[in-house]
Amino acid sequence: MDDDDDDEGPPGLPPGTPFYMTPKGAAALQDELRRLWDEERPKVTEIVSWAAAQGDRSENADYQYGKRRLREIDRRVRFLRRRLDRVQVVDPAAQTRRDRVYFGATVTWARADDTEASATIVGVDEADPAKGRISWVSPIGRALLGKQPGDTIRLRTPAGLEEIELVAIRYLDDDGDRS
């Protein structure tokens, strides 16, 4: 999805579905917005102004690159502002029902070959499977939501149908400490 597209909701869900995010994820987006608007954009604007004063803009690489970078920054700023306007922050540490998988849970499951895997269920903008952070709208995220330890889940994967068993649920604060 292009950053300039309208945010109708997370992929595969109806329009108006909230953008859930952990406090750490929301803070990261706010920090990115602040950095782009208060630091990077003024620097690029200064370069573009200097380059424009040099004369022929059609062959001025500093001007051309600067204008392109300003458009990229402005597009990302619009995206971040729209996203932050609609974000619903959910603090995993505040979860009172800890017997089932909800947003922010760190879950461990066992595969048929007895290997185990763990991941934390986070918002779409925070997902990073390589770091064990899966989106709540991903196939495995959706399959795990609402389940409890001992449940067997049938999961459709690119390799075919796989059965996994939910082994454990933990709710951690943003620093990774048990709460």
Image: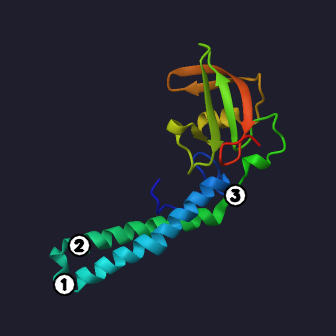
The answer to whether residue 7 shows anywhere in this view is no
Disc 2 marks which residue? 62
Q: Position of residue 107 (x, y in %)?
A: 68, 32
Percent of width and height locating residue 103: 71, 44
Secondary structure found at label 2: helix
First in sequence: mark 2 vs mark 3: 2
Q: Nearer the viewer, mark 2 or mark 3?
A: 2
> Extreme right residue here?
96
Residue 153 higher or lower than 46, as above or below: above
Q: Is residue 178 left or right of residue 56?
A: right
Q: Is residue 58 visible?
A: yes
The residue to which callout 3 is attached is 88
Q: Secondary structure at mark 3?
A: strand
Residue type, mark 1 in image = Gln
Q: Residue at x 58, y 40 (%)?
A: 133
From the image, tell me which residue sits under label 1. 54
Q: Could you tell me if the residues under marks 2 and 1 are in contact, i.e. CB atoms within 8 Å?
A: yes
Spatial distance from mark 2 to mark 3, Cα to Cα? 40 Å
**Left or right: 165, with 25 as reference point:** right
Residue 139, position as x, y percentages in the image = 60, 35
Mark 2 residue crowding within 10 angstroms, few (<14) / some (14–19) / many (20+)? some
Q: Nearer the viewer, residue 59 or 12?
A: 59
Residue beneath the point at 60% across and 54% down: 25
Front-lying residue, 85 or 24: 24
Amino acid at dot 2: Asp
User: For the view shown, which residue lies furthest in the top direction?
Assistant: 113
> Looking at the image, is 88 positioned above or below residue 51?
above
Q: Residue at x 33, y 80 (%)?
A: 46
Amino acid type at mark 3: Gln
